[in-house]
Image (spheres, grey):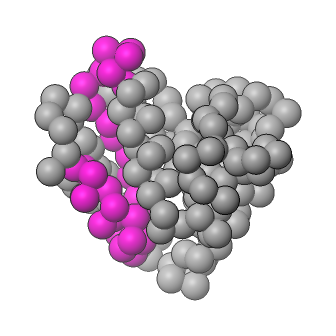
């Protein structure tokens, strides 16, 4: 399926099971890396679809390809979660979702994106750095390190 046909739609309360299932599939690759389920795999998505904006990238027939969960904060747009179905990872979907988040932030008058990730998720860290994110804080979490990253929307990335 070509990646130019998927459409972004905002999730509603009835989408919480689809969201949860996609997140569990997307993050499953990290379980052996960190020896436990990452926090997004344990989140309450029935609540998240109400509390946050979750945009779904759907393909033909409504097949769920990816999602981005965001929360508008007073001075930035927080990216709570990005999940890409394993069949679509490494194809630019994450970059497309970050670009979508940047558009949302600018439309709301915010000049920065922020997120956190596990330092062991090297592919994700490299993607965020390539897209202009910088680490501004680190914090130990369980037996891992959490990276807090941000990207200014003042200038285009790299």
User: Residue 1's image quarter?
Assistant: bottom right
Task: Decide whether residue 146 is among the magenta residues.
Answer: no
Residue at point 70% right, 48% down? Answer: 59
Residue at point 63% right, 37% down? Answer: 7
User: Residue 103's image quarter?
Assistant: top left
Task: Decide whether residue 120 is among the magenta residues.
Answer: yes
Q: Residue 137, relative to residue 72: is it above or below?
A: below
The residue closer to the viewer here, 96 or 28, is 96
Q: Residue 65, relative to residue 16: is it above or below?
A: below
Q: What stretch is highlighted in magenta?
A: 105-133
Which x, y percent locates residue 12? Answer: 76, 28
Residue 128 lies left or right of residue 83; in this view the side is: left
The residue closer to the viewer here, 1 or 156, is 1
Which x, y percent locates residue 45? Answer: 72, 43
Q: Can residue 136 be seen in this view?
A: no
The residue closer to the viewer here, 59 or 100, is 59
Residue at point 71% right, 57% down? Answer: 22
């Amino acid at each position: 399926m070509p990646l130019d046909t998927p459409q972004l739609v905002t999730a509603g309360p009835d989408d919480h099971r689809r969201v949860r299932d996609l997140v569990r599939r997307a993050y499953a690759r990290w379980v052996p890396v960190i020896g436990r389920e990452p926090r997004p795999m344990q989140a309450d998505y029935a609540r998240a679809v109400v509390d946050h904006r979750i945009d779904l990238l759907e393909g033909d027939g409504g097949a769920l390809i990816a999602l981005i969960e965001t929360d508008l904060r007073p001075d930035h747009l927080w990216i709570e979660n990005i999940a890409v179905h394993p069949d679509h990872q490494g194809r630019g979907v994450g970059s497309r979702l970050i670009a979508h988040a940047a558009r949302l932030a600018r439309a709301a008058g915010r000049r920065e994106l922020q997120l956190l990730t596990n330092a062991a998720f090297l592919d994700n860290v490299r993607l965020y750095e390539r897209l202009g994110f910088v680490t501004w804080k680190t914090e130990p979490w369980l037996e891992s390190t959490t990276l807090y990253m941000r990207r200014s929307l003042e200038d285009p990335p790299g």
